[in-house]
Amino acid sequence: MKVIASSLRKGNVVEKDGKLYVILFAENIHPGKGTPVTQLDMRRISDGVKVSERYRTTEQVERAYVEEREHTFLYRDGEGFHFMNPETYDQVAVPESVVGDMAPYLVEGMPVQISQYNNIAISLVLPQRATFEVVETEPVTKGQTASSSYKPATLSNGVRTLVPPHISAGTRVVVMTADAAYVERAKD
């Protein structure tokens, strides 16, 4: 199925020269002068080689037909990451190479979209936000203004991020799974 390059997103699968590629990063660039382009960083599924391509935003790209289903994360072991289809209770083992840098954000029971091609997991998409506890951060400094000053913090999943000065260790916070950016204090 052909789609325009500007509609491609992270996790989509495209076919190029008879090989399948999963998109790791997609950015639409609109220069002040000239033609807008779409920059794609992709990983070849067959051997894991990363490539970077640039297309005109209106150019047609062949998108591979993949089956996308929601699964629930169960656990991680030597085989990889294990997910369960909540409708059929079938389990899928996804290798670490497919999960990549999303591994720290996986929490037991988290719903995840898994894309499969010929019953092989090729990519997964996490929810946009996840909740973690702040394990370590600097103490609050008196007299520090609240105007957009952030301090470093380590979350319970080991990821480092920046949080507002009023957040202390033990506080649960919501972060974006794409870049670990602080969103808000958890409401639970």
Image (spheres, rainbow, N blue to C red):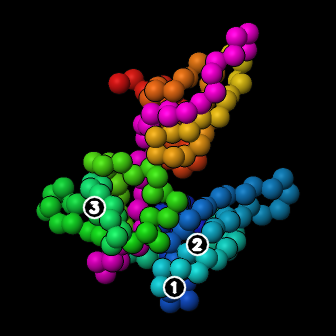
Circles 3 and 2, Cβ within 8 Å, touching? The answer is no
Question: The residue under label 2 is which amino acid type?
Answer: Met
> Where residue 9 sits in the image (x, y, percent)?
53, 60
- Magenta stretch: includes residue 146: no
Residue placed furthest toward the left: 88
Question: The residue under label 1 is which amino acid type?
Answer: Asp
Residue marked by disc 1: 47
Is 185 placed above or below 86 here? above
- Quarter occupied by residue 186: top left
> Where residue 30 sits in the image (x, y, percent)?
75, 55
The residue segment tinted magenta is 117-144
Residue 37 located left or right of residue 65: right
Relative to the observer, which residue lies in front, 63 or 176?
A: 176
Residue placed furthest toward the right: 33
User: Residue 83, labelled with which disc?
Assistant: 3
User: Residue 42, labelled with which disc?
Assistant: 2
Q: CA distance from mark 3 to mark 1?
A: 23 Å
Crowd tier of the residue under label 3, counting other residues whose Cα lies within 10 Å: few below 14, some 14–19, many 20 or above:
many
